[in-house]
Amino acid sequence: MRKGQNPAKFVKDVARPERITVALLNYIPFLSGFYAETLDVLKVSLESMRKDAGLPFDLMIFDNGSCEEVREYLVSEKEEGRIQYLILSEKNMGKGGAWNVMLAGAPGEIIAYTDADVLFSPNWLSRSVELLETFPNVGMVTARPYRTSPELYSSTLEWAKQNATLDEGQFIPWKTFLEFNLSLGQTEEENVKVYAETSDWRIQYKGVTALAGASHWQFTAYKTTLQQFLPFDMDKPMGQVRQLDKRMNDAGYLRLMVSDPLAMNMSNTLGYLRDELKDAGKKKPISLGKRILEIGIIKKMLLAVYNKIFSWYYS
């Protein structure tokens, strides 16, 4: 038999979530090798996100089965009130599985999704929401201009031709273009040709400027829009995330980017902050040892061993 009344019955007010939920997905299985600096990257990402977003938000983090050190850090952040919603998954559900939980469960009317390796600049959130609220039928807004596949924003161009001022040209400065691609492990040499042979689409509507395109690594969207594309059925921990980009375009939604670089991919190191990308992007003479490792059959064998070790750990 119950004794007394539940004290919660006498609480007259409950906390209200912010209109915007920033939803971050994290996965750091160990702190060595590829992941040696990733906890530091996560900390820098969170600090930059909070510094001056331009709008208030609640923070939701979904941790996809990280190691103990990372979970302890996240719990301490939650206890200090710096994370409003923390989900610690026992196993890695993959990006699609995590999205199914995050994009359906985030309490905000607007969800600003981000991977855990993004460096944010001031007003990244307010500028993203400005595009979301100014343009009609927006699917997603990414807080950085960079060149994406034209087939993934064809619906945006079709709308802009009829309803806005649309211009084609090289509106993304070379430096902005290059620094992002260097963060993906590309070289400056290979990007010179790509930059010269491709272009950007600038859209001006109601006095606001955007570029055509967006991407799944960081985006801001209405929750009701995102829910139309759930659930995601992905059979791998990574990859296949372009499903969201393609589905939105096929459904006729606008996919936009802010005109300034307000988000930057750091990948798995703090090399961007140490100004290492520029040197890394230069093509250097390849040593004999490296040439041997690049031989097809040897490279294939080494990758197979790496994948097997990772598979054992993951399972």
Image (spheres, rainbow, N blue to C red):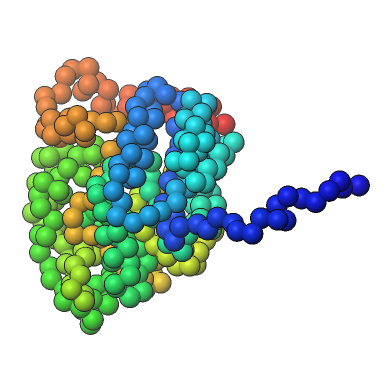
228 or 59: which is nearer to us? 59
Instruction: Using the image, determine if residue 115 lies above or below residue 275.
Output: below
Tell me what residue is drawn at x 42 percent, y 65 percent: 222
| Residue 172 position (above or below residue 267) | below
Residue lying at 70% horizontally and 56% vertically, measured from the top left: 10
- Residue 131 found in image quarter: bottom left
In the figure, 31 relative to 88: above or below? Answer: above
Q: Is residue 7 left or right of residue 180?
A: right
Spot occupied by residue 185 in the image (x, y as percentages of width and height): 24, 37
Task: Say above or below: 80 vs 169.
Answer: above
- The part of the image, by quadrant, that contains residue 55 is bottom left
- Between residues 145 and 9, which one lies in front from this camera angle? 9
Q: Position of residue 309 (x, y in %)?
A: 48, 25
Q: Position of residue 91 (x, y in %)?
A: 57, 37
Question: Where is residue 90 drawn, in percent x and y?
Answer: 59, 36
Query: Is 257 placed left or right of 6 in the picture?
Result: left
| Res 100 visible | no
| Position of the C terminus by quadrant | top right
Could you tell me which residue is drawn at 13 percent across and 56 percent down?
Answer: 172
